[in-house]
Each structure stands twice: as structure tokens, then as C-alpha cells.
Amino acid sequence: MSPQPVIGALGASGIAGRVVGAAGLAAVGLLHVLWAAGSSWPARDADALADAVVGSAHVPAAGPTAGVAALALGGAAIVSGAGGDRPVARLIRAGAAAALLARGLAGGVVATRVLRLPDPSARFRDLDRLVYRPLCLVLGAAVAWGSLGRIRRRKMG
């Protein structure tokens, strides 16, 4: 008998990685859509939002915020399986995992310096250490794991 592909080649853990990664990216994207539209949720006002998410006194303009929303929502679609195993889809998944892991490892202070923003506030630094960095690491690992789960295993016949 010849080897046959195992049903569910992605595997349960790979599927879980894709679900967690896609759901996280979709949530990030939707938050950015709200912010691009002028909402300050979950902060009380725009100043508090700016301090919490970018560590400065000013909320980024709607255009760049909408751009982040589009990237996150597009990434969520690709991570969830859109594009199948085409090379461009695999490249996007790898790029999303690498970007999230790099952000999680480097931290928000490095990110603000790379973006040539002012040094972030103490509130942002605390939130980065307690929430943003761990979230980026979990999402990056989930996206990577979901992408690696695509390796097909074969069952001996």
C-alpha cells in the first residue's frame, strides 16, 4: 500500500494557532477602525487614549490608524486561511508572525524610536510591559504555530 495523507493535515493545534492569531488580529483591526473613525473607546477621551496606546499627547491621524486597521484585518484573513498555501499567503503569514514576535521582544519604546516618535509616557511603558508585549508574543507565536501546522504528515499503510 502507498502512504496516504492523514485527514486533517493541519492538526488541532495548528488550527487553534490560526484561530487565536486570526481572532487577535481581527480584534486589533476592529479597534483601529473605531479609533480611525474618532472613537476613544475604551479610554475616557482622546488624550487618555493617546497616552495609553502611543504614549504621547496626540492621537495619530485617521489615515495611519486606518492603515494599521487594514493591515491587521488583512492579516487576520490570511492567517485564517485565505490564500491557501500560495507562496504570497505563506510569506504574509511568516511576516505577520515575525512582526508580532519582533514587537513583543523589542517592546514599545523601541517601536516608538523606530517610528521617530517622542519617548513614550510612563503609562504607555507600563501597559506595554503588562499588556502589549505579552499580547504580541502570544499572537506572534499563534500565527507561527498555525503556519507551521501546515506541514503534511503521512500515515503508513
Image: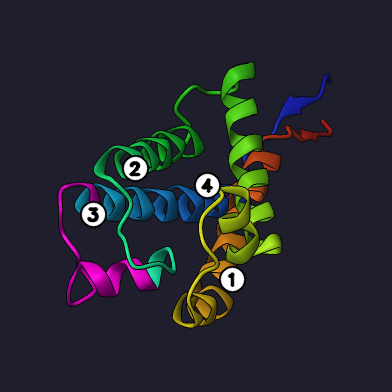
Nearer-the-camera pick, 78 or 35 = 35
Decide which of tag 1 and tag 3 comes sooner along the chain: 3
Q: Residue at 56%, 57% (x, y): give it.
A: 112
Q: Residue at 38%, 73% (x, y): give it.
A: 52
Residue stretch in magenta = 35-51
On the image, the x and y values in percent for residue 46 come to 21, 66
Real-space Cα separation, disc 4 to disc 2, in angstroms:
19 Å
Nearer-the-camera pick, 156 or 99 = 99
Residue that label 4 marks: 18
Secondary structure of the residue carrying numbered label 1: helix
Task: Judge whether residue 134 can be spotted in this image.
Answer: yes
Residue that label 2 marks: 69
Real-space Cα separation, disc 1 to disc 3, in angstroms:
22 Å
Q: Are marks 1 and 4 in contact (CB under 8 Å)?
A: no
Q: Residue at 41%, 42% (x, y): give it.
A: 72
Q: Are marks 2 and 3 in contact (CB under 8 Å)?
A: yes
Residue that label 3 marks: 35
Real-space Cα separation, disc 4 to disc 3, in angstroms:
26 Å
Above or below 81: residue 3: above
Residue that label 1 marks: 134
Q: Amino acid at mark 4?
A: Arg
Q: Residues within 10 Å of mark 2 (few under 14, many from 20)?
A: many
